[in-house]
Amino acid sequence: MYKHILLPTDGSHLSNAAVEKTLAFAKEVGARVTLLSVLQPFHVFSFDAEQLESTRAEYERNAPEHAERYLAAAANRAKMLGVPCDMLTVWHEHVYQAIIDTAAAKVCDLISMASHGRRGLTAMVLGSETLKVLTHSKLPVLVYR
């Protein structure tokens, strides 16, 4: 079965639910997990609330700290469940590509992630990182919704 699961997370409520379910699954199958946070470079024009509320300097200082907090919380949960876990934060322009590249670099055999379930115009404008991972990944992708 699966031995190494890549688990991208953004600290959102839905993503945290996927973390819980993935860690339970990893424990069940005896897999280790790599928790991943992908931070995008600052853009003046953005749909990301963190970027809209910050200056470039604030964003570049606060984003890694924020990622560290939610990754640490997920890693603590993994430790409580006895699931071996690594944490990784990467900066990348395209979240989906960072997920796929990290899965390959870490020799993962499954990507497990949440889908925010955006529909209509929101999905067209913002896109779906989950859909892009599903479309471009050569690895199996487990989606929690």
Image: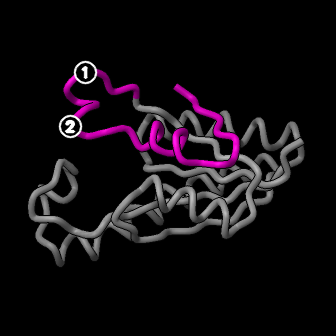
Q: Nearer the viewer, residue 112 or 141?
A: 141
Mark number displayed over residue 84: none
Q: Residue at x 66, y 53 (%)?
A: 6
Asked if residue 79 shows in the view, the reply is: no
**Residue type for callout 2:** Val
Q: Residues within 10 Å of mark 2 (few under 14, many from 20)?
A: few
Q: Position of residue 99 (x, y in %)?
A: 53, 57
Find the distance from the CA under tag 1 to the CA under tag 2: 9 Å
Mark number displayed over residue 125: 2
Residue for badge 1: 120
Q: Quadrant of residue 129?
A: top left
Q: Residue at x 15, y 54 (%)?
A: 46
Q: Position of residue 78 (x, y in %)?
A: 71, 51
Question: Which type of secondary structure does the marked residue at label 2 adopt?
Answer: helix
Q: Quadrant of residue 4?
A: bottom right
Q: Position of residue 132 (x, y in %)?
A: 45, 43
- Which residues, given as a range, are shown in magenta? 117-145
Q: Residue at x 80, y 52 (%)?
A: 83
N-terminal-most mark, 1 or 2: 1
Q: Nearer the viewer, residue 62 or 133?
A: 133
